[in-house]
Amino acid sequence: MKQFTYERAASPEAATAAAKAGGRIIAGGTNLLDLMKLQVETPSQLIDINRLPLDKIEETPEGGLRVGALVRNSDLAADPRVRRHYGVLSRALLAGASAQLRNKATTGGNLLQRTRCYYFYDITKPCNKRAPGSGCAALAGFNRIHAVLGASDQCIATHPSDMAVAMRALDAKVETIDAEGAERVIPITDLHRLPGNTPQVETTLKPGELITAVTLPPPLPGVQIYRKVRDRASYAFALVSVAAVVEAEGGRIRSARLAFGGLAPKPWRVLEAEEKLAGATVNAAAFDASATAVLAGAHGYGSNDFKIPLARRTLRAVLAEATRT
Amino acid sequence: MKMNTPVGANALDAEPQGVVGKPLDRVDGRLKVTGGARYAYEVQQGPAAAYGCVVEASIGRGRITSIDTRAAERAPGVVLVLTYANAPEQGSGNHREAHPVLTGPEVSYYGEPVAFVVAATFEQARAAAYLVHVTYEKASGTYALRPNLERARSPRGSDASPDSAVGDFVVAFAAAPVQLDATYTTPLQSHAMMEPHATLATWDGDTLVLHTANQMLSQGQKVVATTLKIPQEKVRLVSPFIGGGFGGKLWVNADAILAAIASRQLKRPVKTALTRQQIFHVTTHRSDTIQRVRLGTDRDGKILAIGHDSFSGNLGREQVFEGAAIQTRSLYAGANRRTRHRLVPLDIPVASSMRAPGEAVGLLALECAMDELAEKLDLDPIELRLRNEPTEDPERHVPYSSRHLVACLQEGAQRFGWAKRNPKPGQVRDGRWLVGMGVAAATRGNPLMPSKANVRLGPDGIATVKMAMTDIGTGTYTILTQIAAEMLGLPAERIRMELGDTLFPQASGSGGSFGAASSGSALFDACTGLRAKLARLAGMDPDAASFADGRIAVGGQSRAILDLVGADGIAADGEIEPGDTLKNYSQQSYGAHFAEVGVDADTGEVRLRRMLGVFTAGRVLNAKTARSQAIGGMIFGVGAALTEAMELDPRFGYFVNHDLAEYHVPVHADVPDVDAIFLAELDDKANPLKSKGIGELGICGAGAALANAIYNACGARVRDYPITLDKVLSALPAQT
């Protein structure tokens, strides 16, 4: 760990100003500290925002919830309103990490966690995300946990969050404040970028811009499911995950929201796959058509080829479960 | 005493004190849960220690062309940067003989230490370690096992003979009416013990004191002395508490030697611990294996020919091979037999012992092959094993010291509900889960090692035992306490156990499941000597005397032993040596594993539902710690079957997933209902305790029971461990 200075931010504005000047914001630190020990991240200044008043869950006038950026994953998962109306989010949170980590990890930090690509974590290996221009060791390497959608020949890393996948299905909005004190709202689909030729740029946040809250729209009707497929029963990242909110009645699907984890550099959603389901009769053919739409253009890199059939099977199982009468 | 003949009835059989075998709580439990047990890295001794951090080679094979240490030396707190340029000349040998570090510019494996940065704090040392700039001239290396089988050679100078043959396997197999010929692969594995390798090195004049996490202190003392070229008596290893080893701390690792060298140069204590990421390369691992099993039987399932060939890999200069076919020499009957081990020299970190070296992966192949054979024969897998139960060791033609595999299989079958198993795969469904049951036999060799002990009964009524034995978390303190208490007729609270220091009598250490038997037998011998002294003082016949509740008694007469001790106390030494009973008997512990798994019909995820192990391992010294050992071994087997694998990237010669986030050991949620029981057995050929090793038996065969259960659940016969969902997926039924 490189030597760094540590400063506690007095206000969101102060935090963003310090961050724009080169500081790195720390909240739960569950990812950042690991990366600093390995010198994957080498900030010279840490700006601690843990004491900022961003830890409330409030109801919005529209009937949704506004979740402060510092609300801990455990608290968000356990909130009765989240459990009642946003089950997919509560389950996604509880499917992630361990109890100890969830107690520390924050809502904002979870969105901004870095990939778990093995090569990204090892500074002696080429990685365009960590060291732009050095190459991608995963492309022709061991890439079991890597992306099959949305990747580029510069980077095939996935975004590891479970929470963000559920939020993507719910069409959450991310509230920020920038270094000039200007606030804005970013639809979650626009928060994360695809790697393209600049995999080191992972979000659309401007330098210093701070996430202050995540807003959940009013609850959706229907069955909510978060299905995480992984190598062991707990404490493993998703190989494939599906967040689904499906409304069905009388053998027909009224609407479906589907988001995927483990498949892509960001929480993945394919509107066409949802449109294929809207109004469709509940049957395997409809599920399969939806899966085909999700996986159009999917490409494996060797050790992760299995994710493509796995994603299809997982989605079909989730849809079957969501529409079971 | 030397184990040349079976022991007769002895003092432990009568159990007048009633301590041995009881589920006594760990005597060191309170210390451990309150933080009172000090592990190597927690020891503070002498002046403030400096902290060292290893710099690993980031190439697999080649040569260092330059090391620039200037930035590191200028970094805050740094007091020393060791490289091959300023490291002393050291002794050499294989990894069991010496562990020289920083010997020159050659890099022979990825992660080999190329520098050691010492600073006032660990954080400063680690930060400065990143500032050491090394340039290399890379050489092409040979890293992966499978593509290099043509380089395989017959290992020489290792513990076990690589080959064995009885009868004519080739002819008998070719002629067998029913044949099974299958190849299984097992992956590279890491021990993943809880406590990282750590050492505090201090010099007291010309004597080196190492507080270090090491399983076999007396061996380690020799290795350190050879490496540093100092007399053995000038090396003291101290290791009263060790947070798991599983073989990863059997030998001396770089942490100990680097800390010792740095401490000598700096004339102050130096402390170091490997990071979890470093452990994967800097220390040893279990080799991957490629195993071919051939079984030829008559139409009734009687084995006519049994063959087991295994390839493993190791760093080129090492001879240790993974003895995956060793158990096949004694597990089942059959007149024509052949086993062969071949070793592929590679440019990867040293492969060495990991919990149940040999059997742990060998049984993953053999016991899966038996399941496949049973299906071919349309026989119940248990019945197949019963039909091939030998009456003597089929290769050595000597009797078994004791063997109750059949009883384990039958008792387990009854308790587990084996009769309810549907032999046809894919027939049992529980919601989204396809459910299956599997069985596998367990066997593990039962070695005995030389060991010594000293016991002294003081005038305060406390018996103090000293030996350079270790407790790596298995419960050694507790079982030795029980043996001493039973033998001396004292309550357990009156026994003080002092272990983990080479100042004490030389002991076996912990490894190969020989710890309890070897150190316990030495203690038994010492206590026997002390009993004789007490009996003589009491004017009683030592052979007739019984010891209980602090009294020695013969017939109606009894004396309080404290009245005999005197002001100076009484002491006795004891010793055990392996002898002819190892030669004259085939010695193994046995067991049977039963597993029920669920396979997710959609995703192929495999989850254990319940598991039972039934074992016989001679006298059980503590019912609680024995069960914990067995269950721990079974869980190790669950990891081997389902999740654990180091993935080699042959471009770099390194293990890609070198942390516990991506090297998947089982977590609590993976281990639902696991139980282990021991059937009564006494093995009078094994040692005077009549016990056998249990530290590794639990893993032996465990994973195969899961593999067989997976096949029974869904019809996927996966011969490539671990059985991750991607290997199961294609065998799953179509979704409806």
Image: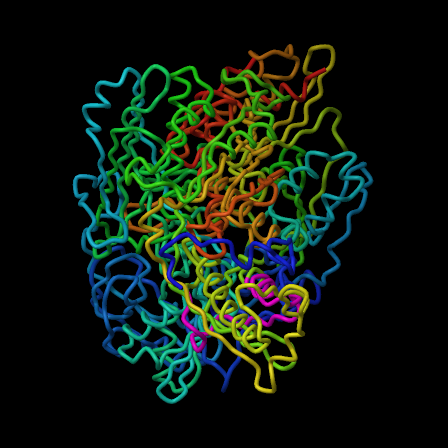
Answer with the quarter of the image where residue B86 lies. Answer: bottom left
Judging depth in this view, the residue of B301 and B342 nearest the camera is B301
Image mark count: 0
Q: Give the range drawn in magenta.
A: B480-507
Residue B510 placement, left or right of B170: right
Judging depth in this view, the residue of A45 and B654 nearest the camera is B654
Indicate the position of residue A225 as horizontal and vertical percent values.
67, 29
Residue A56 placement, left or right of B152: right
Q: Is residue B557 above or below residue A26?
A: below
Question: Which residue occupies the extreme bottom position in the image?
Answer: B205
User: At 53% from the left edge and 36% from the top edge, which residue is drawn?
Assistant: A230
Magenta-span inclusion, residue B497: yes
Residue B184 placement, left or right of A220: left
Answer with the quarter of the image where residue A138 lies. Answer: top left
Judging depth in this view, the residue of B90 and B474 nearest the camera is B474
Magenta-span inclusion, residue B212: no
User: At 31% from the left edge and 50% from the top edge, which residue is drawn?
Assistant: B583
Residue B21 placement, left or right of B519: right
Q: Would you say residue B32 is visible in this rendering? A: no
Q: In this view, does B664 lie above or below A277?
A: below
Indicate the position of residue B420 as horizontal and vertical percent values.
59, 20
Q: Colour scheme in the image?
A: rainbow
Q: Is residue B313 above or below residue B609?
A: below
Q: In this view, does B493 lie above or below A59?
A: below
Indicate the position of residue B620 as horizontal and vertical percent values.
55, 50
Indicate the position of residue B141 as horizontal and vertical percent values.
21, 51
Q: Would you say residue B707 is visible in this rendering? A: yes
